[in-house]
Image (cartoon, helix red, strand yellow):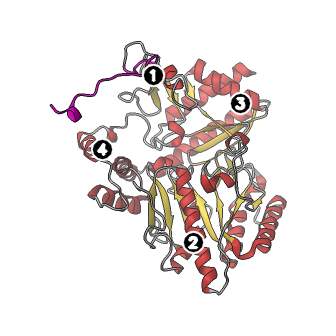
Amino acid sequence: MTAQHETVRDVAPTGVPAPREAGTDVVEALKAQVTGDLMNIVVDLDAGDGCKLRDARDGTEYLDLTMFFSSAPLGHGHPGLRTSEFEAALVRASRVKPSNPDFATFEQARFAETFRRVVGIDELPLLFFIDGGTLAVENALKVAFDWKTKVNARKGIGVRGSRVLHLEKAFHGRSGYTMSLTNTDPTKIRDYPMFDWPRIPSPAIEPGERWDSAELLPEEVVALDAARAAVQRYGREIACFVYEPIQGEGGDRHLRPQFLQAVQALCRENDVLTVADEVQTGMLTGQAWAHQALGLEPDLVAFGKRLQVCGVMGGRRVLEIADNAFREPSRISSTWGGSLVDMVRATRILEVVEAEGLLEHSRQMGELLLGELRDLAAEFPSLVKAPRGRGLMCAITFHDPAQRDRALAIARDSYKTLFLPSGPDSLRARPPLSARPEELVEAVAALRKTLADLA
């Protein structure tokens, strides 16, 4: 056997135990080497059922309403991901890591076609794949910069499209261009260099009578006026307006369609593209894309998380420029263009979603979950308020942010139920599309016990 084919031994650095060693504290071993915010759980990848996640160390089961920050759309242990055919396809795709933008495979072609069929939008036929939601948003912005600069040039205007209109309390990532857009937790952006791009108020509305108002609400008028002022000030420099249909990291903040449609109209009047950041909301709100229920027609959509592969869909006004950034060689690209293994998994997930009608199922389960949260808020009005949701993107707000943090810990440690924080004072649930009614009821029951402990 040659040296390059010798068996690789499971050798760990001095002082750090090999993760597979019996008795190893895997969490502490990782914390010693890898940056992160690890829970004290070791995921058993061979177990789990629906919303039940098993700790590989001792078999403890948790009711999981995090789904790895909403990136496990079929939950744990779904039979559709346990077939021998699927596992063989994963192994086949994992032996090498091809540069997908440059070398074609049947696997990538099958994924692109399945994506188009299950969640595609006819008016957005162009696709770009990459690893990471941040890079998806960033490349959507690059498409917009390119488009606006070329539109300006056609009109004899020598101005580059170089600014992005965006909202307060937005999270679009934390690298490169997206750093200048994210403005939730100051820790994520503090002291990093950023562009001074125009930021307007984010007039999120809590559920209630005001939501159904046909006219723009006062705070929406203020935000729209700020958008107009930005367009007037920066003129041909503004390339796009980027928004989350529901601001997840900012606190599950819902923006009314009347407001977003008004900003969309303003953008169309001024040669500004609209970019829907659906990295968090895609395939979560009871249909393929959250912007569809709001009556919006974005020119670009950034996606990721539940889709497994991140990227950008483009079309509409982008197509007015024949040599747009999707079509001009090497204008946007990356070495790998997404992972082929992720594409194989995504293809299978989309097939299951389609075959089992899980988008409609998730809408129904979302109505159940929201109803349970409303009952909870009525029982504990001194602790929580504002139950809200669209599909399975649900949340509730605590009057005291410190109580929210305590609730997350009590639910996890005492009742083996996992939720996520959202914004400064909210708790969010992100169940899988395949969630069963009894799992959602059980999760809210655990939260009810948690609130009782707090009270």
The 10 Å Cα crowd at callout 4, few under 14, some 14 to 19, many 20 or more, is some
Measured in 3D between alpha carbons, the distance from the residue under mark 3 to the one under mark 4, in whole angstroms, is: 41 Å
Q: Which amino acid does label 4 sit on?
A: Ser
* Residue assigned mark 1: 55
Magenta part of the chain: 1-20
Q: What label sits on residue 146 in the rendered view?
A: 2
Among numbered discs 3 and 4, the one appearing first in the sequence: 4
Q: In this view, does 171 lie to the left or right of 434?
A: right
- In the figure, 218 relative to 63: above or below? below
Query: Which is closer to the viewer, label 4 or label 2?
Result: 2
Q: Could you tell me which residue is drawn at 35 percent across and 55 percent down?
A: 99
Among numbered discs 4 and 2, the one appearing first in the sequence: 4
- In the figure, 20 relative to 327: above or below? above
Among numbered discs 3 and 2, the one appearing first in the sequence: 2
The 10 Å Cα crowd at callout 2, few under 14, some 14 to 19, many 20 or more, is many
Can you give x and y, in whole percent of width and height, for residue 246 in the image? 64, 52
Measured in 3D between alpha carbons, the distance from the residue under mark 1 to the one under mark 3, in whole angstroms, is: 24 Å
Among numbered discs 4 and 1, the one appearing first in the sequence: 1
Q: Is residue 344 left or right of residue 395?
A: left
* Residue assigned mark 4: 94
Q: Could you tell me which residue is drawn at 73 percent across and 63 percent down?
A: 259
Measured in 3D between alpha carbons, the distance from the residue under mark 4 to the one under mark 2, in whole angstroms, is: 35 Å
CB under 8 Å between discs 3 and 2 = no
Element assignment for label 2: helix
Element assignment for label 4: helix
* Residue assigned mark 3: 404
Q: Of all residues shown, which one is farthest toward the left?
A: 1
Can you give x and y, in whole percent of width and height, for residue 399 in the image? 79, 34
